[in-house]
Image (tube, helix red, strand yellow):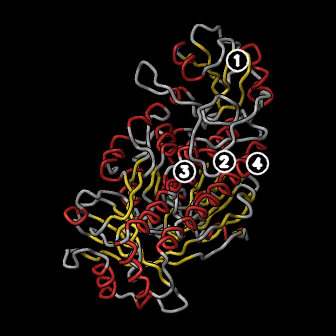
Amino acid sequence: MAGEDAAERVDVVIVGAGPTGLTAAHLCARLGLSAVVLERRDGPQRSPAAHVVNARTFEIWRQAGVAMGPVFEQCLPPEEAGEVHWVTKLGGDVVGSLPFERQGDEMLAVTPTPIRNLSQHRLEPLLLAPDLDVRYRHTWTSMSALADGVSVEVDGTEGRYRIDAAYQLGADGAGSPVRHSLGIELTGPRTIQSFVMVHLGADFRSLVGDAKGVLYFLVDPVVGGTFVCHGADREWVFMHGWDPGVEPMEAFTEERCRDLVSSALADPTAGFEVLGISNWHMSAQIADSYRSGRTFLVGDAAHRFPPTGGLGLNTGVADVHNLVWKIAAVEAGWADPSILDTYEAERRPVARFNCDQSLANAFKLIEVPIAFGFTDDPDGSARVLADVLADPARRAEVEAAIAGQAIHFDLLGLQLGHVYDGPLVVGDGTEAVVLDEPARDYLPSTRPGGRLPHGWLDDGTSTLDLVDLALPTVLLRDGTEPPALPSSAVARAVDAEVWDDTFGIAADVCLVVRPDQHIAARRSVVDAVGALELLFPAAAEVVS
């Protein structure tokens, strides 16, 4: 490690070793960029946090070279985490239930990796790899601009040192010291609602019985809260509303939290261990800028969403998937530095959409207590609850309100359907498939801007696996004569049957696909080089 006066030199310094920062490190490693990850914590996340890993995130990790076997082994199987329930108590009367996203084998027609639930504290160790330089207990303290990058001051385990990097990624979370140092503000409500989080060690399998699921919303107006299952036989989180203006966090002692959890169980004698107590503030904010010079904000440093939709982690992973290949392209010389401007232009609208969707989901949940007729009087509302459950007609109204929450837990279009526009996409005159709110459905399409459709190849891989992470890829129907491409592009043949069934385009058409698996152009084969010249002028200088 460098001494106090000397500086290490790397291509990329990544601040923060959460899922976003670690994904960026994997991408850098695959693309030949030297990277250091700085993390002030003493190790990976220890308590449950984000737990929804959507299909697109898995696809990105697959391309980034993450060892997917161990990851999938740790995921909760759909039969255990495939439903959401509204209950009087955990283990009590189930008032209504909904599927939690589309997790079945039918999803294999549109993605090789359907959505799963995997707690962040189990995920982060799986994202570590021997070839990644991840430094825990190394705290980013300050930065200064260099002519060719940034210089970062670090408090490490053996003292202070300096890293000079061509680029810096601020993946350091919602409170982002990197963002604050740049003077970049967040726009949007900082605190919509606050919660106390009680991390539990418990085996509640016998308590919930057949009502297996990942989320349990309590309709008990006296207790209130939500149980999140991180493994029915081992870990749970109880989220309870908290008003910081009324009482301090210190009021939530372990004894009080034990009483809260016990009162939320159908069997108050059910055993559990309180593993931790923390708090959390629901926000809906987006950074006013994603970039300052050679420093880029990614993940929660760039955007903060309500958890209703499970979009925070997944949006962050897609951020670095969009950014890192562009950095590598500039460093390799086949893309002009102006390509880096497209990061914010492409990703900030996605954050805006995801934030609005998450916020809409959060407010929509209010429809259920409204259907019950609850008021601010907990005791009165408790009597209303009993009356509603005893009246089939009134109970049916509540069940209808629960059914109306289905869009909250069925957002396949949002997972796979975001479409980019701008200088890295060449339109072909056809109307793009644009996400509507809610982004419930996904329609595979080869129109420029969208993700390349998935189809299974004979060797068990996906069409997505044909896309080169380092260079633009020109996809051609098998048997089509490839054009003379520049050396900074690759051509790949697609089985004719897969081409016809998955892409549904003519044999004399090719797809120019960006390294992030988004289609940049759909042109005739003879126009492939012309499309590359429009998209990446520097890549078209040398013809192989």
Residue 71 x, y percent position in the rendering: 36, 46
Disc 1 + disc 3, Cβ < 8 Å: no
Q: In the picture shown, does residue 224 fall above or below 176? A: below
Residue 257 against residue 368 in the figure, above or below: below
Q: Residue visible at 42% across and 50% down?
A: 127
Going by the numbered disc 2, the residue's amino acid type is Asp
The residue labelled by disc 1 is: 485
Give the residue pinned by disc 2: 436
Residue depth check, mark 3 versus mark 2: number of the one nearer the observer: 2
- First along the sequence among labels 4 and 1: 4
Residue located at (44% from left, 36% from top) = 107
N-terminal of the pair, mark 1 or mark 3, is: 3
Q: Nearer the viewer, mark 4 or mark 3?
A: 3
Query: In this image, 80 relative to 435: left or right?
Result: left
- Decide if residue 529 is on the left or right side of residue 301: right
Of callouts 4 and 3, the N-terminal one: 3
Kind of residue at badge 3: Val
Q: Which mark is residue 341?
A: 4
Q: Is the Cβ of the residue at disc 1 closer than 8 Å to that at disc 2?
A: no
Which mark is on residue 317?
3
Which secondary structure, mark 4? Answer: helix
